């Protein structure tokens, strides 16, 4: 499985989708990750302010890895002059 997230909203949505696919409640995921259910809810809704360590704990509890990749650059034809 390979998912791309470019914003907190997208990351939260991916975490929520994987959690639901695995049949876990927010409380169950929180217990597996050693955090509170409220924090899982905050992250899934894409709110700012979550600790990276908490995100990594959630990903580990879901058996997911965090992979960093360069963003693709737009082709010259996709860049528009807005002046």
Image (spheres, rainbow, N blue to C red):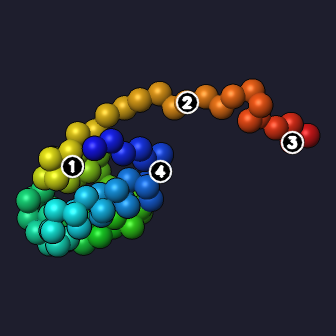
- Answer left or right for 38 relative to 10: left
Tell me the tag on residue 72: 2
Residue 26, compared with residue 64, is above or below; it is: below
The first of marks 1 and 4 along the sequence is 4
The mark closer to the camera, 2 or 1, is 2
Residue 26, compared with residue 14, is above or below; it is: below
Tell me the tag on residue 59: 1
The answer, for residue 8, to whether it is visible in the render is yes
- Dot 3: what SS? loop
- Answer left or right for 50 relative to 80: left
C-alpha span from label 3 to label 1: 40 Å
The answer, for residue 53, to whether it is visible in the render is no
For image coordinates 20% across by 71% down, the residue present is: 26
Q: Nearer the viewer, residue 54 or 12?
A: 12
The first of marks 2 and 1 along the sequence is 1
The first of marks 2 and 3 along the sequence is 2
For image coordinates 33% across by 41% down, the residue present is: 2
C-alpha span from label 2 to label 3: 21 Å
Tell me the tag on residue 7: 4
For image coordinates 16% across by 53% down, the residue present is: 62
Residue beneath disc 3: 82
For image coordinates 16% across by 62% down, the residue present is: 22
Q: Position of residue 34 (x, y in %)?
A: 10, 58
Tell me the tag on residue 13: none
Q: Position of residue 80 (x, y in %)?
A: 82, 38
The first of marks 4 and 3 along the sequence is 4
- Answer left or right for 54 relative to 6: left
C-alpha span from label 1 to label 4: 16 Å
């Amino acid at each position: 499985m390979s998912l791309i997230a470019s914003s907190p909203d997208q990351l939260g949505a991916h975490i929520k989708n994987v959690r639901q696919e695995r049949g876990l409640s927010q409380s169950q995921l929180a217990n597996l990750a050693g955090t509170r259910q409220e924090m899982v809810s905050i992250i899934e809704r894409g709110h700012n302010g979550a600790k990276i360590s908490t995100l990594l704990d959630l990903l580990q509890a879901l058996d997911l890895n965090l992979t960093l990749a360069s963003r693709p650059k737009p082709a010259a034809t996709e860049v528009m002059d807005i002046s």
